[in-house]
Amino acid sequence: MDNIQIVERAASPQEFIGLRKAVGWGCPGEEAVKNGLCGNLFSVCAEHEGRIVGHGRIIGDGAFTLYIQDIIVLPEYQRRGIGMMIMTGIMEHIKGNYGKGTMVNLMSARGKEDFYRKFGFFVRPDDNFGSGMTQFL
Ligand SMILES: CC(C)(COP(=O)(O)OP(=O)(O)OC[C@H]1O[C@@H](n2cnc3c(N)ncnc32)[C@H](O)[C@@H]1OP(=O)(O)O)[C@@H](O)C(=O)NCCC(=O)NCCS
């Protein structure tokens, strides 16, 4: 899409909460979000005319275990390649800054597995790996 910029920066807590709400996700309180975003290893925002329209971030130990989180594109901007641009920026950062053997993880939303397969991810469980597991407090 024309005039979309991928900018290396963290979303503000208000931007982050707004994006999550726009795609129907719940969100912790603003203080928790503020503290959580301080823990980002790397983040990108997609901007259109100065407004945030998409986001992605990496969390993890900063050495060999990474999690890609909160890949979000505003509904009215989806299916125009912005998600691919965000993931491309994230994967370029990972490949440029982390070594062989680094484990890169993510939890796919239902039905989005093919989107992530394009970037080399495989679905668990398979013959070698068990399921990913989650608990919400
Ligand atoms: C998942 C998500 C980030 C993808 O963002 P997006 O900007 O729509 O992604 P892209 O446009 O780059 O690609 C998505 C699909 O649109 C297709 N597409 C891209 N441009 C297109 C166009 N002009 N016309 C039609 N389809 C197009 C892509 O081929 C891709 O197809 P696929 O998903 O079937 O493989 C977005 O749907 C989203 O925010 N969803 C809600 C939050 C969510 O579930 N996030 C993922 C958490 S794991």
Image: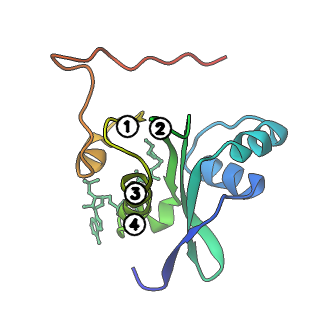
What is the image's colouring? rainbow
Contact check, label 4 and label 3, Cβ < 8 Å? yes
Residue bearing the label numbered 2: 66
Would you say the beta carbon of the disc 4 residue lies within 8 angstroms of ligand 1? yes
Task: State ligand 1's quadrant.
Answer: bottom left
Tag 4 secondary structure: helix
Q: Amino acid at mark 1?
A: Thr
> In whole angstroms, how far apart are the C-alphas of marks 2 and 4?
19 Å
Residue bearing the label numbered 4: 85
Contact check, label 2 and label 1, Cβ < 8 Å? yes
Q: Amino acid at mark 4?
A: Met
Disc on the earlier residue, 3 or 2: 2
At 65% from the left and 79% from the top, the residue drawn is: 50
* In the image: residue 76, left or right of residue 96: right
Residue at the far left: name it: 127
Q: Residues within 10 Å of mark 3 (few under 14, many from 20)?
A: many
Q: Quadrant of the N terminus?
A: bottom left
Residue bearing the label numbered 3: 87
* In the image: residue 60, left or right of residue 123: right
Tag 3 secondary structure: helix
Q: Quadrant of the C terminus?
A: top right
At 57% from the left and 43% from the top, the residue drawn is: 24
Disc on the earlier residue, 2 or 4: 2
